[in-house]
Image (tube, rainbow, N blue to C red):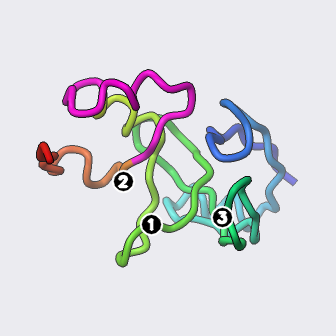
Amino acid sequence: MVTVKITDRHFSDGQTEIELSKVQYMKLKLNQSICIGKRKKAGWSGEAQFYISTCERHGYFLDYQHGWKNHFQCPECYQRELLRSGLAPKLARKSKPIAIPIHQTKSLALSKR
């Protein structure tokens, strides 16, 4: 077993340690996301599969698949994007950041609605 530190904004307020098998750890090192099982967040009506994924800037994070492309979102990158864009200053000040995909951070064109 290998212990890995991950950013968890879904079930805790920051860093969490999780134990992975050697096979799971190798998949993670090869930039693959690994499924850690179904979980239910407070306020949700059902469960979702949660994964550990990798951000090139911030390391490992816990997330579920988003959108029709089933992408993962780094909470640190999204928080930074919110602050830089100024589109949602009230959201950016909340304690738990929302997330956008790391692979879309550079090319994402946020528009005012």
Query: What's drawn in magenta, residue-wise?
Result: 83-99
Give the x, y percent position of residue 76.
45, 34
Badge 2 crowding class, 10 Å Cα cut-off, few under 14, some 14 to 19, many 20 or more, is some
112 in the magenta segment = no
Residue at 71% across, 64% down = 24
91 in the magenta segment = yes
Please say if the residues under marks 1 and 2 sit with CB atoms less than 8 Å apart: yes
Quarter residue 77 falls in? top left
Question: What is the three-letter code of the residue carrying label 2?
Answer: Pro
Give the x, y percent position of residue 59.
53, 40
Give the x, y percent position of residue 13.
68, 31
Q: Secondary structure at mark 1?
A: loop
Question: What is the three-letter code of the residue carrying label 1?
Answer: His
Residue at 30% across, 54% down = 103
Badge 3 crowding class, 10 Å Cα cut-off, few under 14, some 14 to 19, many 20 or more, is many
Mark 1 → mark 2, Cα distance in angstroms: 9 Å
Mark 2 → mark 3, Cα distance in angstroms: 15 Å
- Residue designated by label 3: 50
- Residue designated by label 2: 101
- Residue designated by label 1: 66
Mark 1 → mark 3, Cα distance in angstroms: 11 Å
